[in-house]
Image (cartoon, grey):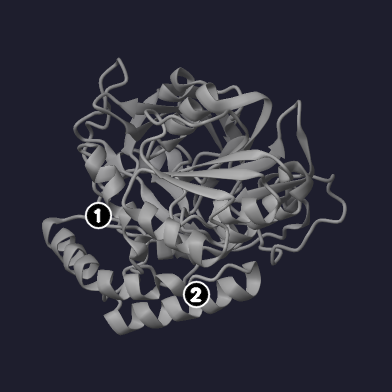
Amino acid sequence: MQAFSDEGDYFYPYAFLTDQKKMLEDAPRMEAYHAAIMENADHFAGKAVLDCGTGTGILAIWAAQAGARVVYAVEATDMAKHARTLVDSNGLSEQVKVIKGKIETLTLPEQVDIIVSEWMGLLLLRDGMLNSVIAARDKWLAPGGSLFPSHCELFLAPSVYRPVHSPAAVKASHEQVLSEWQELVVGIKAMYNVDYSCLTSALTREKDTYHLQSAIEDILGGGDPDDGSDLDCDFEECTDSDSDAGSELRGDADGAAGSTALASKWTSLKSDCLCGQPIVVKAFDCHSVTVEELESFRCQFELQVDHHNSIRAHENAPDEGAPEGTSPAMQAKKDFSSLQPSELHPCNSLTCWFDVWFRGSDASPTNAPRVLSTGPAVPATHWGQQTFVFPSLYADTLVEARTLQGTFHVFQLPKTHRMYNVRLQFSSAREDQAQTIEYQIE
C-alpha cells in the first residue's frame, strides 16, 4: 500500500464511488453500524447528529431514519455531491444537511448530541482519521453526548503464517463492476431501506477514470489490499517478499522509522491460524482519548504459544454461556478448553486485529450495545488483520519458543500522523537476549 505523502493522497480514493463500493460491500461493517443505530433509535430520536466523514451518506441516512432531528453529514471530498444526491433521492433533505469541508475548519450552527463515524483504518489507527473525530468531539459534542463507535480494543495473538502464492490478480472489468453495483443496490434497498440506484449513472461515468487511474498506480507500484488478489484459503495474504529481510531491522531510538523496516502482511485469517490466546494491547474510550495518546503507545506482552493446538472455528455461533457483551476475541479464548491435539504448526508470526463497540457514553449509555469485530472468529471484513511475520534472522529462536515476551510499540511516523509503524522487542523463555524488529503497516 502506498504511503500518504500529503493530504491529497489520503483523500483522493474516497472521492470515487468505486472505492466507496468496497466499504458498502463489507457486510459485517454495514450490519454492525445499522444495528447499532437502529436498535438504539431511542438514543437518536430528536437529537442533533454529526456524521464525520460521511462518504456516500449511509450512516447519516440511518441516523435520520432512527429519528434524529437533524444530521450534519460532513465530507471532505467530492463524494459530498453524491451524498447530497442520495439524501435527496431518499427524501431526507430536510433532516440531513450535507456539508463539504474538513471537520477541523468548518462551522456548525449548533453543538451535537451524537457523533457517528467510520474512521477505522488498518491496525485500527492507520489513516489517522480518529484525529478528526477527536477534533469534532472537542469542538462540537455537547456535554453528555456520545460517539458511535464509543470504545475500542486492539488485540495481539501468536499465529501461523501460511503464505499463498496465487496467480496475478486480474482487475475487475467495467461490466463486472457495474454488475456488482447493481446487486449491491438491490441488497442495500432490501436490507436497509436505502435506495442507491440514483448513483448508478455516476458510477458508470466514473468507471473509466477510476480504472485508468488504478492501472497507472499498478504500473507505478501502488497497491491495495482489497484489490481481490487473495485466494479463499486458510490464510490469505498479499505478498511474502519481505519475510527474509537482513539483520538491520531497527528504527531510531526516538521512535522514527528505520529505513529497513519490514512490511506487515494484510491477512484474512481463519480461526485455526491462531496458536495462542489473544491479549488486549490497547483499549480506549473515544470520549476521552487524546491525539497525544495515539502518537505512540507501548504494551508489555507475554503470550503462551501452543504449537500443537489451534483455535477451531465455531461458525461464529453465539456463546450461550458467555456474559452479555463479551467480545468475539474474548469468546475465542474459551474455545481452547475444547481443543484436541492436531498437527504441529510452528508459531512464526504475531497477528493484530481490533474490535469497536457501540455503547454510548457514561452519561448516555445505549440500551443495546453492539460490537464490530475484525478478528478471525467472525466473518471477514475489508480491514482484515495485520500479521507480523518473524524474519529468518530470528526464526530459530522465536518459532520454537513456548512463551513470547516483549514490548509491542505502535508509533506514528514523523512526517505524517496517518502512517504508523510497529516495533516488536522480543525476549523469549528460551533466550533472554532482546531482539527488535520493526514493521511498516501495509
**Which residue corresponds to the image point at 42% horizontal and 65% vertical from the top-left?**
21
Please tell me whether residue 39 is drawn above or below residue 130 in the rendered image: below
**Which residue corresponds to the image point at 17% horizontal and 68% vertical from the top-left?**
212
Whether residue 38 is visible, yes or no, is yes
Q: Which percent across, then down, holds residue 439?
A: 33, 37
Q: Using the image as rendered, state which of residue 242 and residue 352 is in the foreground.
A: 352
Whether residue 428 is visible, yes or no, is no
The answer to which image quadrant residue 210 occupies is: bottom left
What residue does disc 1 label?
241
Q: Which percent across, then down, holds residue 289?
A: 55, 23
What's the amino acid at mark 1? Ser
Q: Number of labelled discs?
A: 2
Mark number for residue 99? Answer: none
Q: In this view, does 301 lie to the left or right of 436?
A: right
Q: How far apart are marks 1 and 2 (CA)?
A: 35 Å
What residue does disc 2 label?
184
Please tell me whether residue 43 is drawn above or below residue 55 in the rendered image: above
Q: Using the image as rendered, state which of residue 403 and residue 413 is in the foreground.
A: 413
Looking at the rendered structure, the secondary structure element under dot 2 is helix
- The mark closer to the camera, 1 or 2, is 2
Q: In this view, does 103 lie to the left or right of 70?
A: left
Q: Using the image as rendered, state which of residue 365 and residue 335 is in the foreground.
A: 365
What's the amino acid at mark 2? Leu
